[in-house]
Each structure stands twice: as C-alpha cells, then as structure tokens.
Image (tube, coloured by chain):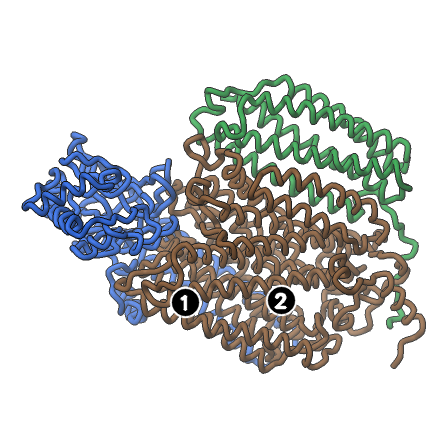
Chain colours: A brown, B blue, C green
Amino acid sequence: MSAPAWEEKERAELARTWHEREGILGRIVSVDHKTIGRRYIITAFGFFFLGGIEALLIRLQLAVPENRILNPDLYNQIFTMHGTTMMFFFAVPVMLGLGLYFVPLMVGTRNIPFPRLNAVGYWFYLFGGVYLYLQFLGNGGPDAGWFDYVPLASSQYSTGHRVDAWVQIINFTEISALIVAASIIVTVFKQRAPGMSLNRIPLFVWAMLVSMVMVIFAMPAVIFTAGSLNSDRTIGTHLFNPAEGGDLLLWQHTFWFFGHPEVYIIFLPALGIISSILSAFCRREVFGYTAMVLALVATAFLGFSLWVHHMFATGLPQIGESFFTAASLMIAIPTGVQMFCWVATIWGSRPRWEPPLLYVVAFFLLFLLGGMTGVMLASVPMDLQVHDTFFVVGHLHYVLIGGALFPVLGGLTFWFPKMTGRMLSRRLGFWSLGFLFVGFNMTFFPMHELGFHGMPRRVYTYLPDKGWNFWNLVSSIGTVLLAIGVVLFLVNVLRSLYRGARAPQNPWGAETLEWATESPPPVYNFLRLPVVASRSPLWEGKELPVVTGLALDRREVLVTGALDGAPSHREEVPGPSPWPFVASITMSVGLIGSVFNVWWLPAGFVVSIPPAVAWYFTEEKP
Amino acid sequence: MRRTAWSAALLLPFTACRASYSALDTASPEATRITNLHWLILWVTGVVSLAVIAALAIALTRRRTAETRAGEGRRARAVAAAAIVSTALLLWLLTASVLAGRAVATPVGPGALRIQIVGHQWWWEVRYPADPPSDTVITANEIHVPVGRAVLLELSSTDVIHSFWVPNLNGKKDLIPGRPTRHLLRPERTGVFEGRCAEFCGYQHAHMGFVLIAEEPDRFATWLASERRPASEPIDAAARHGREVFLSSACVSCHAIRGIGAFGHKAPDLTHLASRRTIGSAMLPNTDGPLAGWIVNSQHIKPGNHMPPNLLPADDLLDLVSYLRGLR
Amino acid sequence: MSSRTLDVSDLPTAVLDSRSLVWWGTIVMTVIEGFVFAITVGAYFYLRTIASQWPPARTGPPALTAATINLVVLFVSAIPAVALDRAGLRRDVRMCRWMLAANLAFGTTFLVFRIYEFKALRCMWNSHAYGSITWTLLGLHTSNLITSLLETAIVLAYFLLRPVEDRHYLDARLDGVFWYFVVVTWIPLYAVVFLVPRLH
C-alpha cells in the first residue's frame, strides 16, 4: 500500500532537514539522540567486556590459595580497574544511553534540546575511558580501589600517576553524566507530546527523570572529592591531611555522599525498564502508577541520606549511626512497594513467556537476595562483622548485576526490535539467560559464606589453611558459566543484527510512543508528532491524532508546558557540527596533560575557547 | 537457642570447614549477640522474600482474568497490606539492630585491660601500657588477652587506614592515622583466634594478619611478666655470634631488641620473637626454616613489604636464626 | 495516517523567557554549580568544626578591604545586568551591546579586585587545610566568574559582528541570568570566606 503524495513529500523534507552525514566525518559531527544513545550503549558494553576480563583474571587468581598468576601490584591494579570500569564506564553510561535513545521517543519529540552538548558528553566519556586504559596498559592503572581511600591514595602512599588517572576519569565521566542529565530533564519537562501531562508519562521516563535529578545532586559531590584529591596530590593542598587541619574522613563523607546515590542512579532506570517490559507483556498498565512514581521519588530522597553506612567501622557516634541504619532499612520500603505493584500487575494477566519476562523474574530472585544481605549490612553491629569482606562483594554484585544488569539485558532484548528492526533469537535468549543466572549464583552466592568465614575483600591471595579454598574454587568456576552466558548474548545480538527475523513496528503490542514509529525509527523519529490522551497511547483504541504545522525545513521541535503538556511554542535545535568534537579534544588534552603537569589544565581551557566560539557562531548553520 | 540450632542445621555444609575464624563461631557475648541478630534478620527477610517469590510464581501461572473495579480494589488492599507489614517488620529489625548495637558497645569500666594497637603497612604493633612506662610491653602481630575480663583496644595507625578484625570476638574497627578509635573485646573462652586487617591498605593487605590468644588469667599474667623482661641472653657461642650479626647488620636500623641496645622502631619488636607462634604477620610458622627464608628474602614470600633482602653468609644466617630462636 | 490533527503553526517560534529550552538548560547548569558550592561550603564547616583554631593562629582572619569593595562593585554591576535583561526582552540591539560591554567592564573590575581578595586571605592554598578550603571556595567562584566573562565577551563579539536574531537576544538575557548567579552566590560565599573566620 503506497503512501499518499503529501506523506512522501513530508518524509523527504524531514529526511533532508534532519539528515545525518555518513562516513567518519558524519560520525564525528552527529547530534542525533539515537546515534549518541546507541554509542553510549555499545561503548558501555565494550567496557563491560574489559571489566569482565578483569573479573575473570581476579577469579582466576583467587581460584586456589597462594596462586601466582598475578603479583600483588598487578592484582591491585586489576581489581581497581574492574570496579572503576564497571561503575563509571559501564553501569552509568549504559543507563544514560538507554535514556538518551528512548526518552525522546517515549515523550514524542524529535531530538533532545542540546544536541551538540550531548555530543561533547559522549566524547568525554570515550576519551576518558581510552585514557584510563592506555595508562593501565602502560602499567599505570590506578591501584588503590575504585573508591581510593586517603591516605592510601595520597601522593605519599600512592606515588606516580596511577591514582591521578582515576581522579581525571572522574572528571570525564561526571561531566558526561551531567550533560545527559540536563538533556533528559529538559526533554521530559519541556518536549512532551501534546496531551502528555506529567501523570501520563511512562514509568521508564519517570525513572530516568528521577535518576537524572539524582545525577545533578550527586555529581557535584564527586567533583569536590576528586578535585580535592587532585589538588592534594598535585599542588599541595591539605584537605585530607590531618597534620595540617585536613581530615581523612572528609574524603569518605564526600565520596560516599556521591557514591551511594550513584548506585541508585544506576538502579532506578533498571526499575523503569522492568515497568516497560511488564506493561507490554502483561498487556495492561502497571498497577499503582502514583505509588510507583512516589516510590521512585522516595528512593531518590532516601538514597541521599544513607551514605554513612559505608563508614560504620570508623568510630562515629552511635546516635548518628542509628539514623543511617534507619534510613538504610527504610529505603527497602519504596522498592518493596514497586515489587508488590509489579506482582499485582502480573496477577491475572498471563504474561507472554519470552526472554525479557525471564530477565524480570531473574531480577526478582536476585534482587530479593541482595535486599536481604542489604538489610544485614544496614544494621551496624552486623555490618561491623561483614564490612570489607567478601560478603559485601556478594551483596553488591547481587544488587548491581541482579538489580541493574539483568534488567538492562532484558530491556535490550525487549527494545532490540525497535533499535535494529530485527528480532533477537528466542532460543539463544533463553540459553544465555540460563547460563547467566546459574553462573552468577555460582560465582557470587558463596561469597557471603566466605565473608562470614573471615575473608576480607581486595586480597590478592589467601593462605590454604583458612577454610576458604572450596568456595573460592566454586566461585571461580561459576565465572566460566557467567562468561559463556555473556558470550551467548553477544552472539545472539551479532547474529540477529544480520539474520534475525524482521521486526514489525510493534512486535510486543506495547503501549508507549516509541512503538508508534518504524523499527528502527527514522532520524526525525515521527513523521508527525503524536497527540496523546492517556498513559497508554497505543492502547487508546483508535489512531493517534498528530501535530501539524511544525516547520519541515528547520530542525524544529514542539515545546510544551512543564506540567500539563499543552503546546507552548516551537523552538529550533542545533544541527550537526564538528566543534563539539574539537572542543572535547582540546579539553581532554588539557585534563589528561594536567596529570603530568598542572599547567596543561589552564592551557587546555584556553585552547578550548576558539572551538567554543566557533560553535557559538555557527549555531544557525548546521 | 532452638532457632539457632535449626538455622545451624540448615547451614551445616557451610560450617563444615574449619570453624576457627568464622563470625558464626562465637567466643564472646558481643559476637554471639551479633550472630543472633544475623539469624533474626535472615529469618525475617527470608520469609518476606519467599512470600514475594511465591506471590510472583502464583501471579505468573494464574490464568488471565479481566480487570474489574473489585479486582483493582483487592489488589490495592493487598499491596497496601504488604507495604504495611514490610514496614512493621523493618521497624522491628531496626529496633533489634539498635539494641544489639548498644549491647555490643557498652563502655567498659576502669578495670578493663588496655592494649594499644598501632597499624603499620603491613604489620601490627601491640603495646601493653603500664605504670611505670618502663614496664610497657611491646610486641608485634600476636595479642594475648585474659579470658573473662574486658579488653579495651586503643587503635591508631602510622600510615594508612587499616581495620582490626577478629571475627570470633566482635566486629571490626578502623585504625585511622591521626584519629584514634577504641574497640572492645570480651573473650569468654580460651582459644587461638585469627585476626586480620580488613581495610585495603596496599600491596600486602592480604597478608596483614595477626593471632589473638585468649588464655586463663594466670597464664596471661605469666606471659605478660615474661614479655616485660629484656631479651634473653644467648645460651651458646652460635647464638652469641648471632647477636653480633644482628647488631652489625641492617637489622638494627628497623628492629628493636630490648636490652642489647637495638632501638629500631620501624619494624616489629623482636625482644621475645621466639615466644610468638607466627612470623610475617601470621603468614608463616615461627620455626627455623621459614625464619631463615624470611630473613634472606622476605620479598619472595611477601612481595612489596618494607623489609629488604639480607644476603648473609650461610654461617651468619644460621647463627642469627639460632640467636633469634632463643629470644623467648 | 490519522485524520485528527492539532495545528501548531500559529505558535511563536521565538521566546525569550523561561519557556525556552535554553533557559531551562541554563537553570539546570546553575543548580549544578550551586550544589558544588553547597558541598564545598559543607566541607568548609566540617573542617572548621574539627579545628582547634580557625583560621590557624599564624594566619588570622582575612583582611576585609578588597572584599568589601568588590561586594560594592558586584551590587552595582547588577544594574547593567538588569538593563541587559530588559534590553534583550525588548530586542534593543544597541542597548544590548552597551550593557554587554558594561557587564564585561564590571566583571573585569571584579576580577582584578578578586586578585587582591586572594591576597587578603594571608595564606596560600598549601599552607594548611583552612588555606586549602578557602582558596577552593574562592577559586570555584572565580572560575564561574571567568566563564561568565568569557560568555559575555563571546556574545558581545557576536552582537558586534553578526546579524542578531531572536535566539541571540535570549543568549544576552541568559548572560545576564548567569551574572545574577555569580552575584547571588557571592553573598553567602563572602560571608563564609570573609566573615565566618571572625566568629568565635
């Protein structure tokens, strides 16, 4: 059935206006949110593989006592790189990528509001990671843990530039996260489809919004922390030097004030993914929309008030500690409410038995277990026994892998048809999930036992008479199964990209706006922006009304009111440009150079001025 | 107690390994209180988790029913009830935790035994302060305490943050440079307990262990009195020669032996080295072979530690070992 | 395709106020910067609480002259900032150019006196923790100041060299908004850096 002539004409004009150039130059100047979102996701998984190799090396070293595969120097670098890679270069960026890709589609707009700034965000992320690994390959990887406590991380006990690399990548990744956060927040508030009042936005969008607001308030803390360590190490400030009035616990306070919200920044989008999958597969709205939204907001607030639970062993006053125990326990409630609402959603709905649903079930099982150990860790006297042992390593992997990675894999399976126009193999999906689930539990469940038996974390080896041998071996064998699961997932993705069944526009019969356009979406997202009248636009029963009157010869988006989604005005957003890339290079060179000589930093800043000027002056010309 | 027995039965496979260092094998009222709290949390959260999993399983397998207002109302009430029950249970656990926390941290009276522990990269300095100060006992990596008496540890560090942990006796406490902390131990049975550092402190964090021996009060007093004496005199010519080797080598720049004029303070005090069970921060048994190997090249055993290799001629080495093995 | 349509062609394409996307982006950025200040001020008071003497005896509290002059400069500079704001809204090119230039002049004056403010601290960033945190606070504000000046210079250059469209009036207004941020954050920071050391 061929489209009417006016439709062809509009399509052609939109394609021309929103055109993304091809080739290497095209990649450099691109500003489309889907391109950049996809880049974040692919790059994040690249780092995931690197972090996974580091994990395999760690478990290989710990498989048997007194192993000599890795000497302590290399081991300390590897476990630091593993944590740093997974937290800063995989877990957060993959959520940023999913948000960048899907939030604009779900709210019904054409692109994010600050496309060129977003490009900078990605380049900073990439350059930071490349720098970190280059230094690691040169035997200069950071080696004081992913949260570098001082004074171990100070210039006195960590000589050379290893910890400096860690400090700098904080800058790179936190700038990147802040940029994406600003983009997503403004998109959600100002660029929604007409009729999409705030109480009609999908739960995934709420999750991303709350998570990005957390980014706004958490990243400044780590800017201060890392910046202060940087200045202590390079120009002799005394913020963490007790001999001159500084304080060691100031590091821990300011780091964890960022660090704990960081895990919720990672976790909240995962909760959003689950809501998306369940509503589609249960073919009904998630139960208790208001409760779900309030639960997200409550989690965010509480997430900022529990950081001291990482510091229970430092000898702080008991009254203070009890407050943080209370907060750490109470945060289980909003997440519990979400789980109860999901069970209520599934109840009586007979969902389709597909891999994304199984990932949700896996999440339930793993996160409940992680929650149990979390309650134990929240209790001060219990924490004092298992803090800094493999018990914590077990707990954190249950909540991060169970609570974030499994939902992400489920979400990618769910959204793969939309992003690529192909379906993933169902069989391979079940197999990879099976290996992942069994391998994960085999690797991480014994760690709780090891923690109770006295095995501290971050040890490069252990003596054979401690009674830890058996479970360490089991855990290390489990990583093989985990690795197979990851490889199977990758194989599934690669094969399906070229040979998967073609996906229709809405293979799951889902209800949110990303399914209202082609698979994959055209660069301009929607031929005409939809108008919505409910939370589940595609289930409204009739064809959606659309917006007309937006200019087709300019990159124009519709701006709507923050609360009610009523159309407000039309605004033009900038198009592709090489200047974000150039400015990213100059600033990155300044930041990286400052590791070796502090004058590179102001120099980098100064050299970034011309590209910034060019950027500003060419804004009207794509 | 019965609950503990049931739980213990369930976890029998776990406790099949050597139980000495386990937080679940308690040797003090504090550790027992913590372990009981652990079982409480495990049961409460376990039951809730199983209930949620059961509800999920039922939800997944029930047949599809149409949505009705009544059904909505039922589900809303179920969710609300679950939330209220969970909150109540968490409040219960909060109360239990706070009470347990207060119980394990009750301040000790003036009759407590004071021990100062100073953390170094990667060994433990142990001091028993006394009045007059010349009676202060200084040793390393091995702590003796009397059973049935409160022990107050005063913890500090000379370099980076370490953490003191004896799982059988109590939770851990950090040793923070410039910020002394205090910790309480109350062993209620005799035994040899392992302790270790539990805060990543550099290369050899993995091998920063120590031994804590809880003994009868009179044996403890004997031990303390013996540690107070200056170094034993060498008993034969070889040992005498060994003492010369010690005094003329690099050893004296770091190690102290009271009574022979060696005052090094950067490394463990060796005055009563032979009375200790282990060397290398609980890495090796304190016997001739390991001791000799350690002296010659501790870097091979504990790479990165601050003791340089000492390539002594074989005779000197044997005599030195002979001297050191006589320092009871 | 649906037959029901919502025609938005009569909506304005140029808004110069808080409905604009770029306005929202600027606000988000100021919130971020503001929170960096808040955390740093928190660290300042944390260090002060654990100090036996603040500032350390050998340093003493900072001299007030340069800072108080600067405070006056800052308040006066609000006048051209407000005028710039209004001129942008009115789309008055000439007034915008003059007020941008005035903003630049006041900002540069402020920057010059800022050098004396640093000297008035009577210590260096590496003297002790008090020096470190105070230089950090002052340094953070100064970096915001420099960024604002650069932004003003670039926008002014554009206003002088290129044809001015609606979006540029918005940028001029936002330049004024960012200057408000620099002014408003200075008030509590002035109190923390220059007055709190005098408290006992």
Q: Residue at x 40, y 56 (%)?
A: A458
The kind of secondary structure element at disc 2 is helix
| Number of marks | 2
Q: Quadrant of the C terminus of chain A?
A: bottom right
To the question of a shared chain for discs 1 and 2, the answer is yes
State left or right for residue A150 relative to residue A613: left
Q: Amino acid at mark 2?
A: Ser
Q: Amino acid at mark 1?
A: Leu
The kind of secondary structure element at disc 1 is helix
Label 1 vs label 2: CA separation? 37 Å
Which residue is at the front of the view, A35 or A212? Answer: A35
Q: Nearer the viewer, mark 1 or mark 2?
A: 1
Q: Position of residue A350 (x, y in %)?
A: 60, 79
Q: Quadrant of the N terminus of chain A?
A: bottom right
Determine if residue B102 is in view: no
Q: Quadrant of residue B258?
A: top left
Q: Residue at x 83, y 30 (%)?
A: C99
Q: Which residue is mark 1?
A: A60
Chain designation of label 2: A
Disc ID at residue A275: 2
Q: Residue at x 40, y 61 (%)?
A: A70
Disc ID at residue B327: none
Q: Label 1: few (<14), some or many (≥20) within 10 Å?
A: many
